[in-house]
Amino acid sequence: MAILEDDNRFGGCEADVTAIERAALDYMEGWFTGDPVRMRRALHPDLAKRCLCYEADGEEANGEFYLSNAEQLVRQTAEGGETNWSDTPYDPERGRNNFDVKVFEIFGDVASARVWSQAYVEYLHLGNFGEAGWKIVNILYGHTQGKAPIEEWRKTDFAYWAP
């Protein structure tokens, strides 16, 4: 797991970073293992998850997006999640090497992070809901389709996004 270096944009403590990473892993590993309990634990009930839609050739976004909500994701996860598309069972111990969670910024009770996997790159917005903890409230994702080796993503510096 990567932690953004200390600078004036990163306001969270180590406990916040750990909790955000846990939410991201509950989300991703819940999906890859078909575990609806972990999926529900990661998501705010009013979550909005979006993916850009592309023309038939897959090269150009067509201005539309596919939208999912928390209940749909929990239901799809209970129905098997990613296990429906993969012939290889997900092994959490080995599989974590194929995920990269990067916390970009924490400001008070809001945060942004990215999760990279062999199949997806997902940008997360999270909120800290007190006793309920850090929950994912927004996701924008794309399919990596083998286009983004994890080593390349780990080298990417997104610091220019912040003022």
Image (cartoon, rainbow, N blue to C red):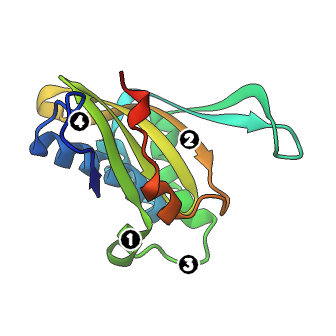
Label 1, label 2: how many angstroms apart (C-alpha)? 20 Å
Label located before the other in sequence (3 or 1): 3
Label located before the other in sequence (4 or 2): 4
Pointer 4: what residue?
A: 134
Based on the displayed image, in which of its 4 quarters is residue 137 positioned? top left
Q: Amino acid at mark 2?
A: Tyr
Label 4, label 1: how many angstroms apart (C-alpha)? 23 Å
Under tag 1, what secondary structure?
Answer: helix
Label located before the other in sequence (3 or 4): 3
Which one is in front, 73 or 144?
144
Pointer 3: what residue?
A: 88
User: Quarter holding the C terminus?
Assistant: top left
Residue 29, x across and y down, in percent: 39, 59
Residue drawn at x 66%, y 59% is: 147
Whether residue 146 sits left or right of residue 41 in the image: it is right
Q: Mark 3, residues whose alpha carbon is within 10 Å: few (<14), some, or many (≥20)?
A: few
Which one is in front, 68 or 114?
114
Q: Amino acid at mark 3?
A: Thr
Q: Amino acid at mark 4?
A: Trp
Residue 33, x across and y down, in percent: 44, 64
Nearer the observer: mark 3 or 1; the answer is 1
Pointer 2: what residue?
A: 141
Q: Amino acid at mark 1?
A: Asn
Pointer 1: what residue?
A: 97
Which one is in front, 32 or 158?
158
